Image (cartoon, rainbow, N blue to C red):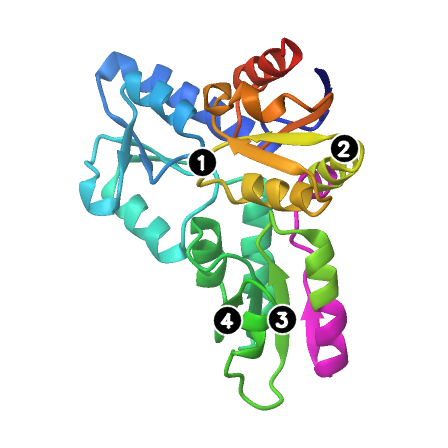
Amino acid sequence: MNVIRAKTAGFCMGVSLALKKLDTALLEAAPRANRVCTLGPIIHNPQVLEEYEAKGVVCADDATQLLPGDHVLIRAHGLSSQEEDAVRAAAGNVVDATCPRVKKAQLAIGKATKDGAVLLLFGEANHPEVRGLVSYARGPAHVFGNLEEFERLRLTKDPVFVLASQTTQDRRHFMEIKKMLCKRFERLTVLSTICDATRHRQKEARDIASSVDVMVIVGGRQSGNTRRLADIAALSGIEIFHVETPDELDPKRFTEKTRAGLTAGASTPKRLIDATELWLSTL
């Protein structure tokens, strides 16, 4: 099997920074035997989370589970402003591992809505990053995942609007939404909150998918950016497989394929991408 591997596959800058901070926290906490905790999963990859759990990292559900001596990391997706306040009140040592691009988006939303403008956020309503972004809005906020959901929103007449996006959303879809809303609303501010790394990954996935027989996307099923890579690849009309490890792949599904594309989400470790490439190349 000829394998075309995406150059952008694997850890993004924000994930790498978060895990480096987590490694540092483990070293600093060890002499005092203090717990190292994250509030929610630090990234969306179950294999990486299992590795850190084996090292003693505790994944807390909320601030009430934290102790004063804990070393606590704010996850790469960020927290809502209310959750962050609760964490800082509960734990003695808090490290912000929010992706810098997510933090930039949070602050941009806060600034753009400081006079009460209505936030229109393109993203997944239940995603932790989106909950965090919405919490920085100083006025009303609405989340929608597509144009159909947007049309169902109940918006007050002729307010000032701010349009923003979850950092890992499909830029093409966002630009279509921006074009439509610019025609509809006279007072609309558009924030550029989609990460450049996301755009490059999506473009490469789209390009590779157009030149192969089958596409494999490696990454956690809870990872929004990984799911979007799978959606983008599927638009080419080829068969796609979203897996967390190569063990999930079935050789029988590749018997008539000669050229496979391979990419991975921003929280997928290199070892899993390498293992998947090896699996494909030996067919």
- Name the residue that disc number 4 marks: 142
Q: Evaluate whether residue 275 shows in this view.
A: yes
Do the residues bearing badges 1 and 3 touch, measured as CB atoms within 8 Å? no
Q: Disc 1 and disc 2: Cα gap in Å?
A: 24 Å
Residue 176 on image: x %, y %:
74, 64
Classify residue 67 as left or right of residue 247: left
Q: First in sequence: mark 3 or mark 2?
A: 3
Residue 278, percent across and down?
61, 11
Kindly report which numbered mark, 1 or 2, lies closer to the viewer in this rendering. Answer: 2
**Which region of the structure is painted magenta?**
178-200
Q: Residues within 10 Å of mark 2 (few under 14, many from 20)?
A: many
Asked whether the residues under the numbered discs 1 and 2 touch, taking CB atoms below 8 Å apart as contact, a structural biologist would say no
**What percent of the width, then of the height, locates residue 271?**
54, 14
Q: Which residue is denoted by mark 2 in the rendering?
A: 208
Query: Along the line of sight, which residue is nearer the eye, 201 or 278?
Result: 278
Q: Secondary structure at mark 1?
A: loop
**Front-most of residues 283 and 48:** 283
Q: Earlier in the sequence, mark 1 or mark 3?
A: 1
